[in-house]
Amino acid sequence: MNPLTRRRLLQSAAAGMALGGLGLGRAVAGGPQTLRLGVAQAEIMPGLPTENIWAFDQRVLRLRQGEAAQIKVTNALEEVTTVHWHGLRIPHAQDGVPYLSQFPIGVGETYTYNFTPPDAGTHWFHPHCNTLEQLARGAAGVLVVEEAEDPGFDADAVIELRDFRLGSDGQFLEFTRARNAARGGTLGTIITANWQSETRLQAPAGGFLRLRLAVTDITRVFRLAVAGAEAKVVALDGQPVDSPMGISPLPRADGSEPEVGPNTWPLVLGPGMRADLGILMPGPGAEVQLRAGLPGGREIVLARIAATGPDLQRKMFQMPVLPKNPLPELDLDKAETLDFTIGWSPEGDAGTSGICGDAPYRFWSIDRKLWPGEGPPDPADPIAPLATLERGKTYRLRLKNETQNDHPIHLHGLAMRVSSPDRRALPPHWADTLLLRAHEEREVAVVADNPGDWVFHCHVIEHQKTGLAGLIRVT
């Protein structure tokens, strides 16, 4: 069965049209794709067009699991760039990290990526060159890899969650401040869903909506909840969960957590993370809300989803089940344990300049080792890996956050099996980005099945750019 049925094409197109007036659409799965990264204008704040946005000409790109993809990327910016396919377990040469897997794409040049996505699910793409500015200006998109066979949802929609740092005139403010970079990061001023402060979608009344959430922000951690419908988390970071999970309500005004039943968890997504929700839409004319909690017990509505058309009268027990992806099998009995400490930098002013942009400071480190930046490495002093993993072996990575700040830790090229220390976190699941909370210790397991030097970094981009990154080598 072709997974792109007419009703799914219509639903996805509706999601694409809600992306802020850029005239940006989505690509249909299958066949060669093209992406152009250039300068655009968009009305993020009503009545105040924002100039000098940097955006891809497709905000939602769809591929198909197991089918070869060819994506031609044209760089129409006035600086070099690359594209990283965040969450995809693909060959190292296609990973999009400058000087590690490719040379940057020059001004006016076109570069072709060729890979076959092994995993269906919700991923995303973004530059890995001058990452702070290019991402902050909007250079990101959601990458949907369709299952080989349609799992059976009645509608499929995408919501990209991110901030923009805009002043009262609708124009960009500075993207980083040193004192914030040394703490939790510099937050944006406008929280958006699909580049709008409140986006509106539609889904069939009484039907099952697969709502794909992707956090493409450079700093903000989102606490999310669904109001007006029954909803379950069916996938995290593109990987189906072992069992669909209920979503707990947002905290009360005093910050306390409401009482919830079994298998119900807070939905917290940091930069780089994704979640697929299975939502049973209410009857005709009703509305579902995606809500976010803010400090001080405040809540905002990010999206309103209208139930339209005749009532399909689905029941929750009929929720479609996502097929598992072909992940490697862990051998935990023979696993070697490696320890990593996320902490401050021993040299607070060790910044350098590079062709892919850099920060003038170094605040952060992994194991007290500084990431040298996104520039060409010195051939006489190449970047040493934090650890070298033997191909095919299973490893336990024990991560210790000795700081009072959150760090969404992303590992390129490999899948992590995340274990949970308590009810505040999520149950065991597969992921590529782990939200390591303040003063928290977590353990993940990986199979070193993909050879290469894989970047291991915090996706609060100010933390990455100021030292919190390294390499894990798979031989």
Image (spheres, rainbow, N blue to C red):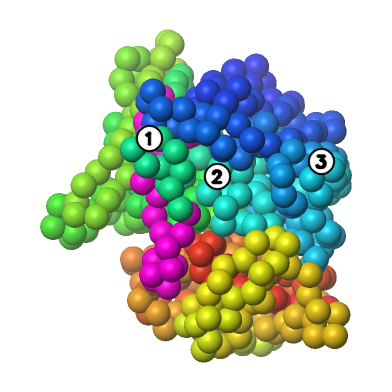
Residue at 34% x, 67% y is: 423
Per the model, the C-alpha gap separating discs 1 and 3 is 31 Å
Q: Quadrant of residue 102?
A: bottom right
What residue sits right under mark 2 in the picture?
Answer: 137
Residue 108 badge:
3
In the structure shown, which secondary structural element does the residue marked by tag 1 occupy?
A: loop
User: In the displayed structure, would residue 55 be above or below residue 154?
Assistant: below
Neighbours of disc 3 within 10 Å: few (<14), some (14-19), many (20+): some
Residue at 86% x, 80% y is: 379
Name the quadrant of the N terminus.
Answer: top right
Residue at 81% x, 79% y is: 378
Residue 71 location (% of width, % of height):
81, 40
Foreground mark, 1 or 3, reads 1
Residue 169 badge:
1
Examine the structure image and report whether residue 87 is included in the region drawn in magenta.
no
Residue 34 location (% of width, % of height):
79, 33
Q: Which residues are magenta?
A: 175-200
Residue 472 visible to the viewer:
yes
User: In the displayed structure, would residue 234 be above or below residue 27?
Assistant: below
Per the model, the C-alpha gap separating discs 3 and 2 is 19 Å
